[in-house]
Amino acid sequence: MKKIFSNKIKKEELKAGDHIYTWRLGYLYAHHGIYVDDGEVIHFTPTAGREIGTGTVLDRYIFSSSLSRRPVSHCPTCGDRPRNDGVISSCLECFLSGGKLYRFQYGVSPGFFLAQVRGTCTFARSDSQEDVLLRAEILLGNGFGNYNLFKNNCEDFAIYCKTGYLLLRNVGIGRSGQAASLAAAASAFASSPVRLMPTTGLAAVGWGIYCANRFFSDIGVHRDVMKIPAERLVSRDRLISI
């Protein structure tokens, strides 16, 4: 039975093709990937293999902190971390970087979706395990475009591997649940009547707008999506020319 307030799982529960994630910097954002098997994860990173990166200006503060300046221990499984960003493969322990393990949920009900926090589930249904792993392995060699926190991030990558869907619009390849939730929150704040700010009505109005924006931004209900074979994502130019 699905947990309403947490998708946390044990490592023993993992299955090949699972979309997994772990929270970073408390619960500020999550890092996502596809579990392959035998402790291997394929995931999309913005910062030379450092899974705690966000691909934004925040990274200069994250990596300049005393925590990030500590020497990184050599992983007996992964060896030296790759110097290039993009789609990489690493062991589960390096992917988690000390965080807890969660499994992203697919094909959820509207009630379950709205009860969950941002970036933890979608209405879209997952494809077969074979299709999921094939997409992840193809993109491991070819990449997933340029990392962008709001347009093309690790969650977009994992959702694509699971569904084959890309959101075709000018803002980029897609927009993940985390980014959509931030946009929904901003929209709710901007749309709420200022005259209601001192009242409890603001909370109700804001929450309603937030939920509506989250709902309609999910890739599972979008109309402007297309199933794209992974072979066509070798370069962004091919995607744009579709």
Image (spheres, rainbow, N blue to C red):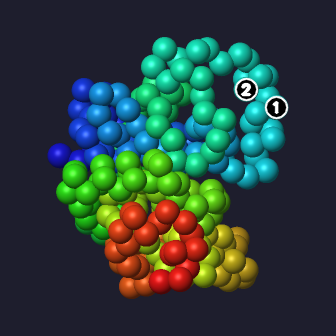
Residue 30, position in %: x, y?
Answer: 53, 45
Q: Is residue 105 visible?
A: no
Residue 196, position in %: x, y?
Answer: 67, 78
Q: Of helix, strand and loop, which one carries label 1?
A: loop
Q: Of helix, strand and loop, which one carries label 2?
A: loop
Question: Residue at point 30% right, 49% down?
Answer: 133
Question: Residue at point 75% right, 43% down?
Answer: 59
Amino acid type assigned to the residue bearing label 1 in the image: Ser
State the residue in front, 161 or 26.
161
Question: Residue at point 49% right, 63% down?
Answer: 234
State the residue in front, 168 or 136.
136
Residue 105, position in %: x, y?
Answer: 31, 53
Q: Is residue 121 left or right of residue 25?
A: left
Depicted 177 relative to depicted 57: above or below = below
Quadrant hosting residue 235: bottom right
- CA neighbours of label 2 inside 10 A, class few (<14), some (14 to 19), many (20+): few
Labels in figure, total: 2
State the residue in front, 236 or 197.
236
Residue bearing mark 2: 68
Amino acid type assigned to the residue bearing label 2 in the image: Ser
Question: Residue at point 46% right, 48% down?
Answer: 140
Q: Is residue 144 visible?
A: yes
The reply to whether discs 2 and 1 touch (Cβ–Cβ < 8 Å) is yes
Depicted 10 relative to depicted 86: above or below = above
Residue bearing mark 1: 64
